Amino acid sequence: MTEPALPAAFGFLASARPGGGRVPDAVFATRGSHTRVDTALPDQSLIATLVHAPGIAPDAAQARDTDTAVLLAGEFYNRAALHSVLPPGSEPDGDAQLLLQLLHRYGLHAFRLINGRFAAMVSTGRRVLLATDHAGSVPLYTRVAPGEVSASTEAKTLAAQRDPRGFPLADARRVPGLTGVYQAPAGSVTEIDLDSGTATIHRTWTPQLGRRIMPEDEATAAVRAALDQAVAARVAPGDTPLVVLSGGIDSSGVAACAHRAAGSLDTVSMGTDTSDEFAQARAVVDHLGTRHREITIPSADLLAQLPYAVWASESVDPDIIEYLLPLVALYRALDGSGRRILTGYGADIPLAGMHREDRLPNLDTAVVYDMATFDGLNEMSPVLSALSGHWSTHPYWDRDVLDLLVSLEAGLKRRHGRDKWVLRAALADALPEETITRPKLGVHEGSGTTSSFSRLLIEHGVAEPAVKEVKRLVVRELFDLTVGGGRHPSEVSTAEVVRSAAERFARGAA
Ligand code: IOT
Ligand code: MG
Ligand code: MG
């Protein structure tokens, strides 16, 4: 049997209690089938709803033995290495079983070993462990009270159950407007005592602060090897992956590696009636020979989908929403059954690609800042694509690729007058010259999202200097409606929310 192209589960809502109980029906943004899990352990019960691709039994997303139960949303990328540290003869079937065996050997330190895209909940003895991958790329939320720990990959599902009131969780981020709901930090295990509701957070990963000096050829070879491996680990045997392609260096690099790893590749580009990067993507498509599709979304339709972008990402950051909106609209426009999608998202963070200037001190300041502030923005959330049934994954935020890129000295990132030099040089033999040398263009610029959103506000009477602040109000109101308030995004009108935010701002500013 070939391995399925999608992970066994995309997400979950779960509850651990000393006695039994039931988990309420959950409305996820993630589209998929729901499977109930009810595991009675000697000291607690773990009950859950798993949300997963239709037609794939989510068996590999759960595992148990005598006193421990594991739930896993997402997947691991260093399986061979993880298998190699298990006793001979142990042959775990799926990532949840693999995790269970690692937990036996290493305790909660098992999570320090995993390079993956996942959120996990573990019930063991009288304790509950909530774990995120290094990047927190699958958001994980919790509400904790003595005698009950609820956890979910979507905050909205916890908002729906107001009781019991959550305990404060030191060091975790509160979710705006949702009393008692916290987001588990990226790269951590939250260890909770079920009886008392007290928690300790253990960090399992932190961004590198030291920088490595390397000769040019060594640095480019290391980057290429790491990216090749990260992409190969994200391609399922026998599956043709889909790359969301802008024609910039980041996604074109992923496309080149994916084409090589899978032997065939589908690509898709989105644009709007105001702007697109279709010609630049086409250069890569022709070079690699991918099966390509262009999707044009009118700007008005794009902005009308703002509620979906906020509902899926559960982010309140207006800049991030401008990056995510075009991608969410693209994912929603993909028909057919669930695909495995690779993106170039995140490359600009360790390489300071958004930072358009030459000075190295400022470049490294930007890298340090961005690596210290990404947590909680949810820009890599799988829900962005899972809302239409697709699984997305981001090779540049593979743990090994990210550790390498972050750690390179700034002079390798900005070199010979080029931004992201080391990546461009690493891909020089795999892509057309015009792609290698193409200046960076953000997705929010290439799709005209930032400017159309600004224009919409100005049409509603917002003065130019207030645009940024009103965007923040709009995004927050969309969050309150769709995440806190449980409204489906199809029932929320961007225009109405813009009108109300503009009015509120005008009243406040007057
Ligand atoms: P950008 O790097 O332009 O795009 C991110 C990814 O989205 C691309 O690699 C590509 O896979 C996909 N994409 C972009 N445009 C299109 C398109 N027209 N059609 C299809 N796919 C497309 C913002 C940005 O510049 O996006 N994201 C940054 C950094 C975010 C800042 N976050 C932070 N500081 N925490 C990034 O690194 O991706
Ligand atoms: Mg990029
Ligand atoms: Mg771009």
Image (tube, rainbow, N blue to C red):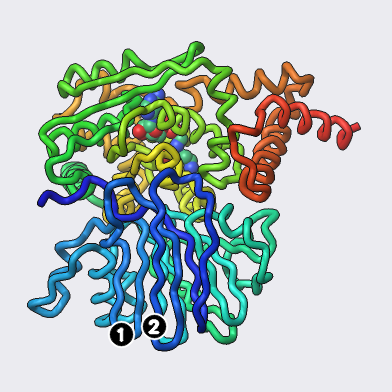
- The secondary element bearing badge 2 is classed as loop
Residue 192: x and y, percent?
A: 51, 79
Say above or below: 359 vs 459: below
* Residue at image point 19% right, 37% down: 258
Say above or below: 11 vs 298: below
Residue 485: x and y, percent?
A: 68, 48
Q: Amino acid at mark 2?
A: Leu
C-alpha gap between disc 2 and disc 1: 7 Å
Task: Give the labeled residue for mark 1.
Answer: 66
Q: Residues within 10 Å of mark 1 (few under 14, many from 20)?
A: few
- State yes or no: discs 2 and 1 in contact (Cβ < 8 Å): yes
Q: Amino acid at mark 1?
A: Thr
Task: Give the labeled residue for mark 2.
Answer: 41
Q: Which mark is residue 15?
A: none
Quadrant of res 176: bottom right
Ligand 1 has an atom within 8 Å of the beta carbon of the residue at disc 2: no
Residue 496: x and y, percent?
A: 73, 27
* Residue at image point 49% right, 11% down: 273
User: Looking at the image, in which quadrant does ligand 1 appear?
Assistant: top left
Q: Is residue 166 visible?
A: yes
* Residue at image point 44% right, 74% down: 46
